[in-house]
Image: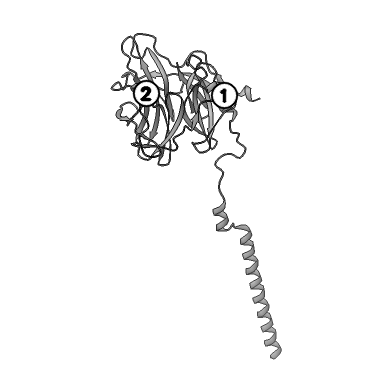
Amino acid sequence: MMRSRTHSFQLMRALRQLHWTYCLMTCLCLLLIIPSHAGAQQHVEPTREASSPEFPPELVHWKLAQIEPLFAGTGKDTWDRFIRERGYILREGRRWHLWYTGYNPDRSDQKSLGYASSTDGRQWTRHPRNPIFAESWVEDMCVVHDGDLYYMFAEGRHDIAHMLTSPDGLHWKEHGPLDIRRTNGKPISPGPYGTPTVWVEGSTWYLFYERRDRGVWLATSQDRKRWTHVQDEPVLSLGPDAYDRHAIALNQVFRHRGRYYGIYHANADPQWKGPWTTCLAVSDDLVHWKKYPGNPIIGSNDSSGILVDDGQQIRLYTMHPAVKLWLPDTRATR
């Protein structure tokens, strides 16, 4: 009887040891398989592709899709006999929008807003009610669709940037000149401030603008009513190379492979008699910009560039003096 009890006790103790050994091994396995909470917090996803070059070939090598412009002034005695400066192309699904500045110097010096649409970004149809807005001077525009409204930032008379809004891209309401302040809260000095280019990220609106094409400044806003400088010096300056030593203006900010790209036009001639070329710069924070060493990316007199993703590739449209389409030149990357 004593031997039987002793044997039972020894068996139970062995089973307990086996149970605790199993629990310990299970815990060790879980620690190896499941990362700790602290380790998960420390892991940060990269903001861009690890192997992505600063200036990928699809953004710097271009070929003209066709000799003739896709869109131009009528050349006739219409309100838009000529078009000029930066028009803006926005693709929303299968619908392509084109807002542009038209004028006829034989009628008036007024610059008015026109609209055209397309299903492929190549063949454009003017709106029958053009000009869709002629209450004030509209030139060199940038359009953002945010929420229920389209926001247009454009130059007004005397190159003073102003804002308009629309529920449909056709019926526009004027909101007056942009209120831009220095870092100390005081208004910027009197004079022109044009080529407004806007980028929206979260609740912050970023406004890039030029002053007499002598540099590009950056201001931000939460309400689009008051814009405050990030710094009082330009974020994109003239030179030092010859191609943009005498004029510079930013036309668009484009997000690609985790970086920001700025399409800008430039002039190498002190009197601006040389070609207005199209150039590229890159940034990781919208404040510090690096120019492409091979600038200009379009060396002919074709400027006011706009990049558009067509769903298969990136297109480059140059908007001045007429709308031309450029496609990535894959031959240049071989």
How far from the left and from the top, in percent, is residue 105? Answer: 34, 11
- Nearer to us in this view, 191 or 8: 191
Residue 68 numbered mark, or none: none
Q: Which residue bears the numbered disc 1?
A: 241
- Numbered disc in front, either 2 or 1: 1
How far from the left and from the top, in percent, is residue 233? Answer: 46, 33
Q: Is residue 313 visible?
A: no
- Among numbered discs 2 and 1, the one appearing first in the sequence: 2
Q: Is residue 11 visible?
A: yes
Q: Residue placed at 36% from the left, 39% from the top?
A: 185
* Residue farthest toward the right in the current orientation of the protein: 3
SS of the residue under disc 1? loop
Q: Residue placed at 49% from the left, 30% from the top?
A: 236
Q: Which residue bears the numbered disc 2?
A: 159
The amino acid pointed to by label 1 is Asp
Above or below, comparing residue 230 to residue 10 in the picture: above
Q: Residues within 10 Å of mark 1 (few under 14, many from 20)?
A: few
Which image quadrant: the N terminus?
Answer: bottom right
Please report contact status of discs 2 and 1: CB closer than 8 Å, yes or no: no
How far from the left and from the top, in percent, is residue 110? Answer: 32, 17
Above or below, comparing residue 52 to residue 115 in the picture: below
Number of labelled discs? 2
